[in-house]
Image: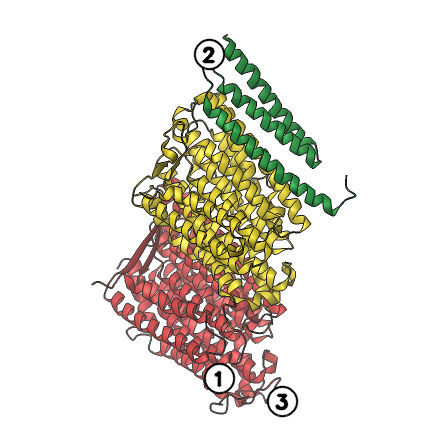
Chain colours: A green, B red, C yellow
Amino acid sequence: MSEAVLTQILYGGVGILLFLLGVWSFLIHAPLLRKLIALNVMGAGVFHLLVAVAYRGLQAPPDPVPHALVLTGIVVAVSATALALAFGRRLEREEPDDD
Amino acid sequence: MNLDPYLPLAILLSSALPGTLIFFLREESHRLRTTLNMAGALVKLALVAWMIWGVFHEHVYASRLQLLPGLDLVLRADALAVLFVALSTVLWLVTTIYAIGYLEDSPHRSRFFGFFSLCVSATVGIALSGNLLTFVVFYEILTLATYPLVAHRGTPDADDGARVYLVYTMVGGALLFVGAVWLQSLVGPVDFTQGGMLGSAPAGLHGQFVVIFFVLLAGLGVKAALVPLHGWLPQAMVAPAPVSALLHAVAVVKAGAFGIVRVVYDVYGVEFAHRLGLLTALSVLACVTILYGSLMALSQDGLKKRLAYSTVSQVSYIALGASVLGPIATIGGLVHLVHQGIMKITLFFCAGNYAETLGVHKVSEMNGVGRRMPWTTLAFTVGALGMIGIPPVAGFVTKWYLGVGAAAAGTGWVILVLVASSLLNAAYFLPILYRAWFLPPPARWPDEHVGGGRPMFMGETSPALLWPPLVTALLSLLAGLLAAAPFSPLEWATLIANREYGR
Amino acid sequence: MIDPLALAVALPLLGALAITMLPSAARTLGLLAALATTAAALWVTLLVWGGGAPRSELGGWGTPLGIALRADGLAAALLTMANVVGLAVSVHATGYFGATAASRHFWPLWLLLWTALNGLFLAADLFHLYVMLELMGLSAAALGALSGTREAAQASLRYLLVGLLGSMTYLLGVALVYTAYGSLDLALVAGAMTPGPVAWAAGALLIGALLLKSALFPMHFWLPPAHANAPAPVSAVLSALVVKAAVYLVLRFWLELCDGIATEAAGLLLGMLGAAAVLWGSWRALRAERLKLLAAYSTVAQIGYLFLFFPLLAATPAGPERDQLITALVLLALTHGFAKAGFFLAAGLVQKSTGHDRIRELGGAAQSLPAVTFALGLAGVALIGLPPSGTFFAKWVLLARAITLGQWWWVPVVMVGTLLAAGYVFRVLARAFTREPTPRCFVTDARTEVPALLLAILAALGMGLAAHPLTVLLGTGG
């Protein structure tokens, strides 16, 4: 197996693993921050997979399409996390005793 | 330009359009509302008269709208449709006048008359349906249009009565829907064809046809008040008298009975239904209902409740006529569609008059009412005699034909049921007549409205309340006396039967 | 040459940006943007109606690199419904929100949501869909919390989190598709997809994520609180459009991508979940104490009806019968869109008038607002599935097909659902008949009441009679 494919499998595999970890964490844990981190881990996993797909070996330039997907995905994840945190702040403000 | 296809639609719109407009009217604009109502009724009458003439001369008035492949809305005027449409139109006109008088100064009149008009539109739609899909569509629309009328008064009683009505009719509608879809998935679009269309289907489907018949019958039987599906009818008496008159003489009950006639004659075909043994089952159900309704009527003190049970019993004569093989019984059943309509509406109008003018709701309060309101009681008498089957009122013609038809078909036991039913009718109507005419009136009536701003006609009650029952009583008498004349209900029913049996 | 496809997506976006710059003119700009967007959308539909298949490549980049927009019959049908509902909601909102602070927040968010919807319906590739789905989710979540109450914030947060879970799953599916087939264009991928473990996995991920977003039982738990606590115009859009967009995508993926891959077993699974949704949603709606909660559970049930079509689609090979099924499904989706939007708008007006939406105490309000009550009634008729609403005819086709295929067990599900729906609709309508005095006139506030009434009329009357034009639009049938 060529080095490129091995790299892809490794990277992609880790990506999928991260995704599954994220899903598990999201479903199990209740606190908002935990869920948000889990979601971001899921996102990171998918980005890993996409970057792996883009890799074409050390000589050829990588495929730009998945990279564009990753960039967009990061932007979306950041915005979504920000909105969720804003909600969390709002809810926390009303009940300062809650952990 | 050939206007024929537009006639059924025009008849439908002649009440649907005014009805929709009436909803938007302010409560105080009675002139405009009355004008819209009466204009619609008269236009409809004119159009129907034209249609009667055309159908008599074998014109075809049909229009078809495709919704989806295989689902067409079809309006078609055949002889049976015309019978029902004519009845609905004439009685709507009369009831509108009555309702205007009855509901004077009542709240929510715009809402009432709006739904009233939609109710008639739905009934006319049922009558003019050319296939099972269209029938089901208008059947359900009728439920929707009548619910607000039953619930109109807004009292807790009205709420309960309306809820019961809704439960029964929704379940019935669901059953009708399932039956219709099932049938259509087996044989394709179910157009109403004279002589029925299922007879030529493969024999393997006959088992399913039997089941479907009972499903359809259950769905139609709710509105037609077949026992044990009749429970909503006495409860729906909480509605104002014009509504009871309309529901029980024209719209809802007749729609159910009409549906049964359509299914037996124009879907299954009477010969095919006989072969499958379905007619016997229908006869039994009809007879049970006839007897049960009459028995229950005996024990009711409330006048409207007694009339309600009488309706339960009488409407099944139509089903009975459909279930006995042979043209004579068919004629009897079909003509009763009209006769029961005009006689029952007379009785309900009179009941409404007693309630409105004197506060009399119970039979036990009716002593001597004939002295106080002679014309109303005269109309009531004509209607009651017709119900019992005494000549020359129209009811006699029906019972005669049913009896002769039963004898011709060899089902003699039906004659016994007819006799028993007539005796029971006498048992619960004659005492009322005796009380009304021959017993002295009480010192004070429960709740007399003397004048109250309304003009008194012949010292009795307001003209809008008095004329309608007199007119319909006269019609009941004429339908019986002039039964042999052209364009009488009897002649028309004979025409339908002849066309059905292929003569 | 002006490109109506791009306009349909760009106009609401520009509107949102403009309002952010000029918040004081929020209502006017919002209404203008609404009118312009609806015009563009109707233009697209007319093009499709005329037999065209408009497609535009943004920026001149072709596939597989570029982002393309395209409209076919299915897209046009939903686009029309979404924009008509959007216009009605916009007109209503000018009156409902007035000129308060909430109005200034509502308009930009609503226009962004509209952008996402139009973009979603006109999308031609998977990634564009991802972006639109995200935009939709974010703006919908923000809109949901507009009323300011704590419950609304909690419900919106839950909605956001669930939506993000779905989006991440969807993105994984997209990544898998790209890995396997090297393209994201819907048409190319559809052609390239062959049955196999990768296609299975990708399909499951994509459709699974969309099922979460369309609130199919048992993943429906986020919907009732979110829709019940949002302001009424927002609820209307959420129930009528946002959820519908997800179902639209499921349908599209099922028909195009998974054609030949999706098995009857998968269809049966969707059907069973749909049946559970119908029964559970209708039952909960019957027991609901609040009008908007009732409407939200009703949405859960109605979505269930849409999924009942899938086992039948899976069992019917391509041809006129399948086309008729698809037409019926779309008819049901469109009718529900109009009906639910009208219902929520009317419910919002009732709530505004009485200060609450508890069903038991609705009597006076229902009677003093005849146009609103009428809207509730007509919308209710369409929700139950009584004629002449489109729902009635769609159910007819559904049951006829089920009986013909021998899958008769769907019949009792649909009928029980219908009867339960009759129960919960008439429970509300019965309140309209009380001994309160007669209202003075039919319409009190035209700007808010007429849109609700028109939507309800469309659902109860228009859609039934519009079945044939829909057939033509979808390019099916003779």
Label 1 sits on residue: B376
Q: CA distance from mark 2 to mark 3?
A: 113 Å
User: Going by the picture, which residue comes out furthest to the front?
Assistant: C21
Amino acid type of the residue tagged 3 in the rendering: Arg
Element under label 3? loop
Horizontal side of B424 relative to B503 (left or right) equals: right
Residue B40 point in image, percent of width and height: 37, 73
Amino acid type of the residue tagged 2 in the rendering: Gln
User: Going by the picture, which residue comes out furthest to the right?
Assistant: A97
User: Going by the picture, which residue comes out furthest to the left?
Assistant: B1
- Quarter-wise, where is residue B255 in the image? bottom left
Horizontal side of B411 relative to C23 (left or right) equals: left
Sequence-first tag of 3 and 1:
1
Q: Residue at x 48, y 46 (%)?
A: C114
Quick check: can you spot residue C390?
yes
Q: Are marks 2 and 3 on the same chain?
A: no
Residue B126 disc label: none
Question: Do the CB atoms of the residues marked 3 and 1 lie less than 8 Å apart?
Answer: no
Horizontal side of B396 relative to B231 (left or right) equals: left
Element under label 1? helix
Residue C52 point in image, percent of width and height: 30, 41
Q: CA distance from mark 1 to mark 2?
A: 107 Å
Label 2 sits on residue: A59
Quick check: can you spot residue B210?
no
Residue B444 disc label: 3
